[in-house]
Amino acid sequence: MAAGHSVDVDPGRWQAELDEVLGRVAGRFGRVEPRRRARAFVRGLLADLPRKNCWTIAEHAGNPSPDGMQHLLARAVWDHDGVRDDVRDYLVEHLGEEGAVLVIDETGDFKKGTQTVGVQRQYTGTAGRVENAQVAVYLVYATSAGHAMVDRELYVPRGWIDDHDRCRAAGIPEQVGFATKPTLAARMLTRAVDAGVPAAWVTGDEVYGADPGLRAELEARGIGYVLAVACDHRVVVGGATDRADTLLRRVPARAWQCVSAGRGAKGHRYYDWAFVRLDHGDPDPVGQAGQRWLLLRRNRKTGELAYYRCWTPRPVPLAVLVRVAGQRWRIEETFQIGKGLTGLDEHQVRRWTSWYRWTTLAMLAHAFLAVTAATERARPTLTGLISLTCNEIQHLFAVLVLQPVRDILHRLRWSAWRRRQQARARICHYQRQAAQPP
């Protein structure tokens, strides 16, 4: 940093960090051309572009057309699952700790039409209603140092799987069958655990808490969980089966404890908490040793209640369960950063392979921001300033490091290219409309 600077920013250090993670994945590309293209693609995802797609990223990189970027996503030979594994290992190396929490959740991206892989009218929590959307399940690694995505799986509805011609047109491999969201989550958790990712807990929302197969898999592996369940979820207490919300009468007023679920943007998130011991081994058939609890959360202002099904391989205090439950919000923050800063949801790709490759490179860009932010938090901060956040790092990196091509002729050629493509699209639409009966 040059003398006289009054801020704690070193763009050269950030560039070295990006070079490190790009160097880690270099071996996943068989040829130098796609490796260089992927580097330019990631830099485009980190740039301050009004919208991120193959057109805008190619223009930012100085390419004459988006053909190369589209080839990278659709047809170039490289191992996107290997890149995913490298990103996971990079995050564990920089953020890892034994008490880490693996967070599972899905997110939906609104789409038009019906040809994009996995798109149909379906419920998405992003909107809180049924929309024409594409839904994917993600796994986030969360520790005290930071949090980022380590895996992803596209949810393909049963209606798609049953339509073989549609699957073939979208490039879905023949061996891909229908899988529920908890099944996709279990696959990702299995990959993470088998790879030696240090983690002690799993948390997620009601979709995952209601699935007995997922709970049984975690118990069999000795991984504790705090999974949200609905108010009508059935549990066994004292040999009787009850809804979760009916157990409130078993909780005396003195049993509620005010505990923080973690820090938010405006300070600690305080709730009232209580827990009820569940019968061992029922209704889950695996009968693993450990303790089962129903954790209850009450909003201190509104009285709104939430319920969590918990399993611990050994006794833990209430504060630990609360901390794990609070980590679920990390994935919401991750989606916000991934979509807002690295174009996670801005792809305009239609096929299976292209979706996985776009998403994997967006995960890599986000991992760079998460690790850089964690590194900056560990450094001394100037008086009166908060530590650099992912948002601030992305903005400064885009302004100070990622200089787009400023050649006037390059920009004018791109303007002409876009207008030509739009003219062709307009003619095709008119011709298609004219061919249809009135």
Image: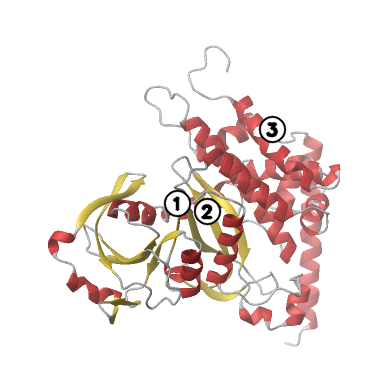
Cα–Cα gap, marks 3 and 2:
31 Å
**In the rendering, which numbered label is found on residue 52?**
none
In the rendered structure, which disc, 2 or 1, sits on the residue that comes first in sequence? 2
The quadrant of the image that shows the N terminus is top right
Cα–Cα gap, marks 2 and 1:
8 Å
Asked if residue 50 can be seen in this view, the reply is no
Q: Which residue is mark 3?
A: 403
Residue appearing at x 52%, y 43% in the figure:
96
Q: Give the answer, above or below, for where 156 lies relative to 44.
A: below
- Left or right: where does residue 345 sit relative to residue 258? right
Q: Which residue is mark 1?
A: 330
Amino acid marked by disc 2: Val
Element at label 2: strand
Residue appearing at x 67%, y 47% in the figure:
86
What x and y, as percent, mark residue 59?
75, 44
Amino acid marked by disc 1: Arg
Residue appearing at x 52%, y 48% in the figure:
198
Element at label 3: loop
Q: Name the image colouring.
A: secondary structure
Cα–Cα gap, marks 3 and 1:
31 Å
Mark 3 in CB contact with mark 1 (< 8 angstroms): no
Amino acid marked by disc 3: Gln
The quadrant of the image that shows the C terminus is bottom right
Give neighbour class at mark 2: few <14, some 14-19, many 20+ (Cα, 10 Å).
Answer: many
Q: Which residue is mark 2?
A: 140
Residue 31 placement: quadrant: top right
Residue appearing at x 62%, y 50% in the figure:
363
In the displayed orientation, state which residue is furthest to the top. Answer: 3
